[in-house]
Amino acid sequence: MQYGEAIRRGFEFAMDEDPSVILLGQGLWSPWYVGNSMTNLEKQFGYERVIDTPVSESAVTGAAIGASQCGYRPVVTHPRVDFALLAVDQIVNQAAKWNSMFGGGAPVPAVFRLIINRGGEQGAQHSQSLYSWFAHVPGLRVVVPATPQDAQDLLVAAIRCDDPVVYIDDRWLYDLESEIADPPPISLADQGPLVRRPGGDVTLVGVSWTTRLALEAADILESEGVDCEVIDLRVINPLDLAPVVESVSSTRRLVVAEGDWRSCGIAAEVIAGVLESVEAGCLVAPPQRINIVEAPAPTSAPLEAAYYPTVDDLCNAVRRTVA
């Protein structure tokens, strides 16, 4: 099953399981907006549960938060994370704060699904990731699935969760295929980084789409005699670095790849957290960060090729670290 289809399967499972689950957002009935991730859900569950909304990001997100206070478990989809910025006040100042402000008496069981949809010469206002913006906010859980199984399982766990969850999926993963099983009865609070590939020479950490790059890079480097341990973060708020620290304590080398800007990013946070936790002198080489270029995204295919990280970029960073 493809990654996008796995998201749809997660929605189907959650809506079958719980009639209080409702979906809101722009273009939910259109593959142009949401790809193959919501195909015919409105026909299967009805237009009162799969609600295609006007283009009013703040109002729709506020409606979802209000619905969460009235017995529903809403998922509001923003087809581009860029335009979810119009709803940041609702997500950051309302959803993330209420339960704390009311002494634990006002949970917000809402999911804010933000889709990264970049490339194809779409330009600076349609190409952002903004992982670290939401990971910076206490009161939000932020998940970034990298595999079809996690795309399904973390979505179902997010919908079941009583905390507000930002679920960020990347259209560059939608064609990724694998076999998947039914969602297990997991709690989102218990989810964290996973070792996708064991190795002994260098720890290579990915975030969502860059986990795919990391696994491809590890295959290439294996033929050169370099054994990469690939770790998929999966959840970036709260960020559990214990598996990464354990890995780095063994490999003594660290490379982090992220499809977002370098300054104040998740890659920087991972490196800082590891350096705070490992023994002095543990690392035998400086840690490496792989990010997109620190500039607004270009509207040009040749410039895009230089703007976004590639498998070669990851391979070269690992080679520098090992050397």
Image: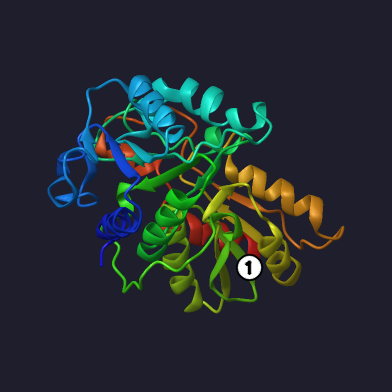
Image location (x, y in percent) of residue 72: 39, 39
Q: Is residue 308 left or right of residue 164?
A: left
Q: Which quarter of the picture shows residue 124?
A: top left
Q: Looking at this view, is 254 or 41 the one in front?
A: 41
Q: Secondary structure at mark 1?
A: strand
* Residue 8 percent coordinates (x, y): 26, 55
Residue appearing at x 62%, y 65% in the figure: 203
Residue 222 appears at what percent x and percent y?
50, 77
Quadrant of image for the C terminus: bottom right
Q: Looking at this view, is 254 or 173 the one in front? A: 173
Q: Is residue 166 left or right of residue 23?
A: right
Vertically, is 318 above or below 111? below
Horizontally, is 92 left or right of 44 in the view?
Answer: right
Which quadrant of the figure contains the N terminus?
A: bottom left
Task: Note whether residue 269 is visible.
Answer: yes
| Total residue callouts | 1
Tag 1: residue type?
Val
What colour scheme has been applied to the protein in the rendered image? Answer: rainbow
Q: Choose between 167 and 223: the one closer to the eye.
A: 167
**Residue that sits furthest to the front in the current view:** 71
Which residue ends up furthest to the right in the rendered image? 280
To which residue does mark 1 refer? 202
Name the residue at 15% across, 52% down: 44
Does residue 148 sit above or below 84 in this rendering?
Answer: below
User: What x and y, as percent, mark residue 271?
Assistant: 68, 49
Q: Picture quarter containing residue 49?
A: top left
Q: Residue at x 77, y 61 (%)?
A: 283
Residue 323 visible to the viewer: no
Relative vertical location of residue 205 with respect to residue 246 in this rendering, above or below: above
Mark 1 surroundings within 10 Å by alpha-carbon count, few (fewer than 14), some (14 through 19), many (20 or more): many
